[in-house]
Image (spheres, rainbow, N blue to C red):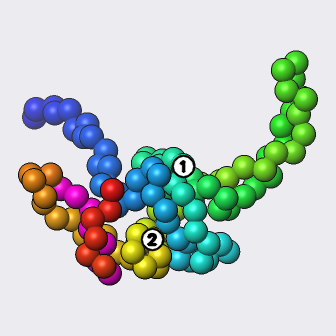
Amino acid sequence: MSTKNYTTKRFTPKFNIKKGDKVMVISGDNKGDTGIVQQILTKENRAIVEGIRMVKKHIKPTENNPGGINEMEAPLHISKLMLVDPKSGKPTRIGRKEVNGKSVRVSKKSGEIIK
């Protein structure tokens, strides 16, 4: 019997949402709220959105930091987010189209290219 090394790379999906996009929450406690994506956590399939899912974090005092209770954004699962259409301001699905040899994101509602 031959022994093979069966280590494989972990598959990371291509997200339709990127940092800086305006998104709307489509389910959960924050349903209907909009915000701008600050960070994408690809390994966890989550995103941090500005002003959405605010949680309180208790910070221990140190020499540099007086400590206290800080409010910060918690990660939100990417499936709960939908990109906002730049033309209508409503949530839309995303398609891909090739323009000048590059794949670009296109809004399914209005057909506009999303930067």
Residue 69, position in %: x, y? Answer: 87, 45
Q: Which mark is residue 84?
A: 2
Can residue 45 be seen in the rendering of this structure? no
Most common SS among magenta residues:
strand
In-front residue for pair 46/50? 50
Magenta part of the chain: 103-109
Q: Amino acid at mark 1?
A: Gln
Residue displayed at 15% across by 52% down? 102
Residue displayed at 61% across by 72% down? 33
- Which is more N-terminal, label 1 or label 2? 1
Do residues under tags 2 and 1 come within 8 Å of each other at their CB atoms?
Answer: no
In the picture shown, does residue 106 fall above or below 90? Answer: above
Residue wearing tag 1: 38
Residue 114, position in %: x, y? Answer: 32, 62
Residue 20, position in %: x, y? Answer: 47, 52
In the picture shown, does residue 18 fall above or below 70? Answer: below
**Mark pair 2, 1: CA separation:** 15 Å
In the picture shown, does residue 17 fall above or below 26? Answer: above
Residue 68, position in %: x, y? Answer: 90, 39
Q: Is residue 73 magenta?
A: no
